[in-house]
Amino acid sequence: MEHVVNMHEAKSQLSKLVALAQRGESVTISIHGRPAVKLVPIKPQPVIGLMKEKWPQVAWTSFAAITEEEAAEWGL
């Protein structure tokens, strides 16, 4: 269902309009009878670091530069 409301109504019922948009309904706010903005839900972003305790910790020394001997072994 599409909901079109004026700015005054949007100010007084913002929580209700946000809930409608989150459920996937179309919500348009008009100014002086002309559509101005549309409320749309934002997709949830993945949480960075989720389950990080499940992965082994890597020491910073693992990222140290390799020696010339190691480079030669790898053909670098």
Image (cartoon, rainbow, N blue to C red):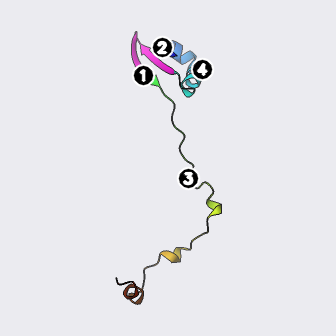
Q: CA distance from mark 2 to mark 3?
A: 37 Å
Q: Amino acid at mark 2?
A: Val
Q: Is residue 3 left or right of residue 15?
A: left
Q: Secondary structure at mark 2?
A: strand
- The three-letter code of the residue at mark 3 reads Ile
Is the residue marked by circle 3 packed among few (<14), some (14-19), or many (20+) residues within 10 Å?
A: few
Graded by Cα atoms within 10 Å as few (under 14), some (14 to 19) or many (20 or more), the crowding at tag 2 reads some
Q: Residue drawn at (57%, 26%), measured in percent from left and top?
A: 23
Q: Residue 1, position in %: x, y?
A: 52, 16
* Residue placed under numbered mark 3 in the picture: 48
Find residue 46 and name its label.
Answer: none
The amino acid beneath tag 4 is Lys
Q: Is residue 23 above or below residue 73?
A: above
Which residue appears at 42% of the width and 22% of the height?
37
Range of residues picked out in magenta? 26-36
- Which residue position holds label 1? 37
- Of labels 3 and 1, earlier in sequence is 1
Please name the residue that numbered disc 4 is placed on.
16
**Quarter occupied by residue 22:** top right
> Which callout, 3 or 4, points at the residue further toward the start of the chain?
4
Q: Earlier in the sequence, mark 1 or mark 2?
A: 2
Mark 3 vs mark 4, CA separation in Å: 30 Å
Q: Earlier in the sequence, mark 1 or mark 4?
A: 4
Residue 11 pos. (x, y %): 53, 18
Q: Is residue 48 magenta?
A: no
* Residue 19, position as x, y percentages in the image: 59, 24
Query: How far separated are the C-alphas under marks 4 and 2?
Result: 13 Å
Disc nearer the start of the sequence (4/2):
2
